[in-house]
Amino acid sequence: QVQLVESGGGLVHPGESLRLSCAASGSIFRGNAMAWHRQTPGKERELVASITSFGTTSYANSVKGRFTIFRDNAKKTGYLQMTSLKPEDTAVYYCYWFGSWGQGTQVTVSS
């Protein structure tokens, strides 16, 4: 079983940046794609960004050009670098990796 622990969320002003981390432990093997999702109250969880084991990335249109997903396989950690944050980015962010979900980390963008 795989455990994922997210960190890096917080309260920031519009235009600021945050970096989320997703640390994996447990029965891990190579070759899994990783993704970040987010969810706000009353809405379905939406895919924000994903990265394959080969490093191919894709992004939701709403974050393209502002967010960057990357991974450090040696550290078993994935990241989501978020820049130029907007109030509409406010959500709980979850990572999905090795068939497991993290517990989520709150990101709040407010002036």
Image (cartoon, rainbow, N blue to C red):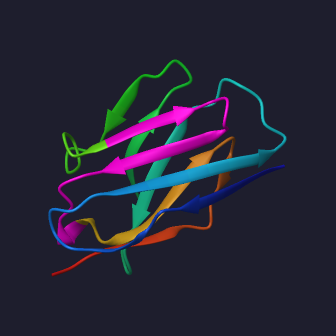
Q: Position of residue 74 (x, y in %)?
A: 67, 29
Based on the displayed image, in which of its 4 quarters is residue 59 positioned? top left
Q: Residue at x 16, y 69 (%)?
A: 14
- Residue 27 lies, with reference to residue 21, above or below; the image says above
- Residue 45 lies, with reference to residue 48, above or below; the image says below
Which residue range is magenta in the image? 68-88
- Among all residues in the image, which is located at the extreme top? 54
The answer to whether residue 83 is magenta is yes
- Residue 59 lies, with reference to residue 100, above or below; the image says above
Q: Residue at x 17, y 56 (%)?
A: 84
Q: Nearer the viewer, residue 86 or 97?
A: 86
Quarter containing the C terminus: bottom left
Based on the displayed image, in which of its 4 quarters is residue 6 positioned? bottom right
Left or right for 27, reference 21: right
Left or right for 64, reference 37: left
Label total for image: 0
Q: Residue at x 65, y 59 (%)?
A: 5
